[in-house]
Image: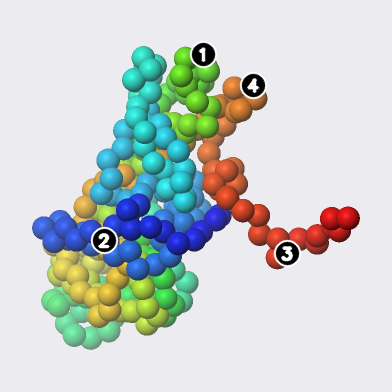
């Protein structure tokens, strides 16, 4: 997947103190890193900004620098669709080389007992640009008649086949999405022993602290974390669902370092 310098106008620094949401544009390729994790864990494209950005079924747009940019909704083209729900899922991701330590009553424990006093969980990220992504329940909504929608779009005047359409929305509850900037960053969650026991660190009764600055900090909110996308093929118009192909479509250059080049002359 291509990465490079990201301009501030694409995702500027945001600090919503009242919602415990902080975005700091200090890491190159942060959306691409997040997208890789979501694609591997949930098999859908990442929503950016996660949790804070609103998306609806039928939204269409383009991929730019690994980010889905919404242009509108297919209802503008008088293309209706049927909505359904899918099985709920969850995500429990932490980067490699992350040490997790649990405490109760000031002492380190292997499991936090229910009703414990001074319960706390500490995450030490040994590597820079690490991620912690958790949501105990992710509700899935979807367009049920995707093939019919695609057929209608194929014959719709003004529709461009390079546009991608949101046909699945992954809506995360009690979400935590955190990324670090520096190595050896430690963050801690304390408070509600029952929530910490089950690692529900996005629970409203859990307090948070960090000893170093963070790149991405979203806690305890509900919102869209993933998007299922499809587009029409450039030839034939059959539906193409976006997964690994999405990454190929967004590359703006080919890395030739591992390719044996032929002579030009």
Measuring 58% from the left and 50% from the top, which residue is drawn there?
252
Picture coordinates of residue 95, whole percent (x, y): 44, 68
In the picture, the quarter occupied by the N terminus is bottom right
Q: Which residue is mark 2?
A: 13
Picture coordinates of residue 202, whole percent (x, y): 23, 59
- Please state which of the two labelled residues, at mark 3 or mark 2, is closer to the viewer: 2
Left or right, 230 with respect to 61, comes to: right
Picture coordinates of residue 197, whole percent (x, y): 25, 67
Per the image, label 3 sits on a secondary structure element best described as loop
Picture coordinates of residue 135, whole percent (x, y): 31, 54
Residue 258 has which mark?
A: 3
Residue 118 has which mark?
A: none
In the picture, the quarter occupied by the C terminus is bottom right
Along the line of sight, which residue is nearer the eye, 114 or 92? 92
| Of callouts 4 and 1, the N-terminal one | 1
Left or right, 107 with respect to 163, comes to: left
Measuring 46% from the left and 46% from the top, which residue is drawn there?
64
- Please state which of the two labelled residues, at mark 2 or mark 1, is closer to the viewer: 2
Q: Which residue is mark 1?
A: 155
Per the image, label 4 sits on a secondary structure element best described as loop
Give the quarter of the image for residue 169.
top left
Q: Residue furthest bottom?
A: 107
Q: Is residue 142 visible?
A: no
Question: Mark 4, residues whose alpha carbon is within 10 Å: few (<14), some, or many (≥20)?
Answer: few
């Amino acid at each position: 997947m291509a990465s490079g310098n990201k301009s501030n106008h694409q995702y500027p620094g945001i600090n919503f103190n009242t919602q415990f949401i902080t975005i700091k544009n200090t890491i190159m390729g942060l959306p691409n890193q997040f997208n890789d994790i979501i694609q591997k864990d949930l098999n859908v494209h990442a929503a950016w900004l996660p949790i804070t950005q609103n998306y609806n079924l039928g939204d269409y747009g383009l991929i730019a620098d690994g980010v889905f940019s919404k242009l509108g909704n297919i209802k503008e083209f008088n293309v209706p669709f049927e909505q359904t729900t899918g099985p709920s899922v969850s995500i429990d991701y932490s980067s490699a080389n992350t040490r997790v330590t649990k405490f109760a009553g000031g002492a380190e424990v292997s499991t936090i007992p229910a009703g414990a006093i001074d319960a706390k969980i500490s995450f030490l990220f040994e590597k820079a640009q690490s991620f912690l992504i958790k949501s105990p329940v992710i509700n899935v909504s979807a367009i049920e008649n995707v093939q019919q929608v695609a057929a209608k779009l194929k014959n719709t005047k003004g529709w461009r086949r390079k546009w991608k359409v949101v046909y699945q929305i992954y809506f995360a509850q009690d979400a935590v999405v955190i990324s670090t900037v520096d190595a050896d960053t430690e963050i801690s969650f304390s408070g509600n022993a029952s929530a910490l026991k089950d690692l529900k660190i996005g629970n409203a009764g859990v307090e948070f602290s960090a000893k170093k600055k963070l790149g991405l900090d979203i806690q305890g909110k509900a919102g869209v974390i993933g998007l299922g996308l499809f587009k029409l093929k450039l030839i034939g118009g059959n539906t193409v669902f976006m997964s690994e192909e999405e990454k190929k479509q967004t590359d703006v250059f080919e890395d030739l370092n591992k390719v044996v080049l032929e002579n030009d002359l």
